[in-house]
Image (cartoon, rainbow, N blue to C red):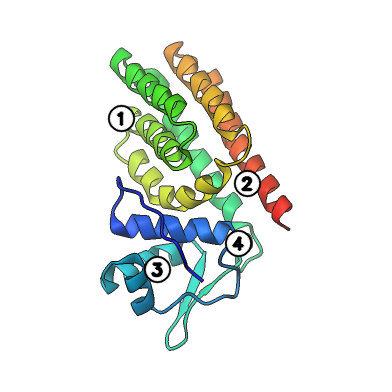
Amino acid sequence: MVEEVKSYSTQTFTQNMIRDLIWKITQNEIKPGEQLPSNDELAKQYNVGRSTIREAIKQIESYGFVQSTHGRGTFILDFEKTDNGTNLLEEIIDLRRMIEVHSIKKTVKYITFTQLQELNNLLMEMENCIDNPQRFTDIDREFHVKITVFSKSPFLPKMFQNISGFFAGVQDSIVYLPGSPERAIVEHKCMIEALKNKDEEKAVEVINQHLDSVVTQIKEKRVKEL
């Protein structure tokens, strides 16, 4: 069942709900095969209109977490395995990797001193809110969005934003793991250093290591829950 609702003041009501439900699904609070409450019930629980509920469910369904059947309702899917037998999480990670590697390659060429300062400021914010996991992941996400924006590509930021909803709930679940925030801070420092030195090879290496670390933590967490 869907119970307590988290508050994410910087996001829209739809994004709030998407993030909260993905977090609950990845935490196994709502298990594969279980049915979500009706749209009317969800509207009451989240204190939003039914149009917001429909929009959120549609987005979550596009990520492969749920399936809506007319006349029956919305059911939780096993997000670790899609219909063709592939791992949904790994597919999304691969997509994110392509976007971020391409972004950082371009950003190495174009990044300015002012933009480096922006990244440093975000890093300091991460260090200052290490005990606030949800705020930490918000800033982490903003850091990665900035890298796509600084690439000067008109497409990469939009592509990254399209999959960021998927990661919101997933990253919420791993930031609570011991050492996870500290590890992320070190990795982000290395990214900034590589960008500062205009070292494309190092920048790509660091972003790949960072994503590998995220995947490893997610898998370790899932194994412990079995």
**Crowd around label 3: few <14 · some 14–19 · many ≥20 (10 Å):** many
> Which of the marked residues, 4 or 2, is nearer the chain's N terminus?
4
Q: How many marks?
A: 4
Q: Say which quarter of the image contains residue 15.
A: bottom left
Please tell me which residue lies in front, 15 or 182. Answer: 182
Task: Name the front one of labels 1 and 2.
Answer: 2
Query: Does the image show residue 206?
Result: yes
Which residue is tagged 3? Answer: 57
Instruction: Report the Cα–Cα distance between label 1 and label 2.
Output: 31 Å
| Amino acid type shown at disc 2 | Ile
Which residue is tagged 1? Answer: 152
Which residue is tagged 4? Answer: 28
Residue 87: % across, % down = 63, 57
Task: Name the front one of labels 1 and 4.
Answer: 4
Which residue is tagged 2? Answer: 218
Please tell me which residue lies in front, 114 or 131. Answer: 131
**Crowd around label 2: few <14 · some 14–19 · many ≥20 (10 Å):** some
- Picture disc at residue 115: none
Q: Residue at x 35, y 31 (%)?
A: 146
**Crowd around label 4: few <14 · some 14–19 · many ≥20 (10 Å):** few
Task: Name the front one of labels 3 and 1.
Answer: 3
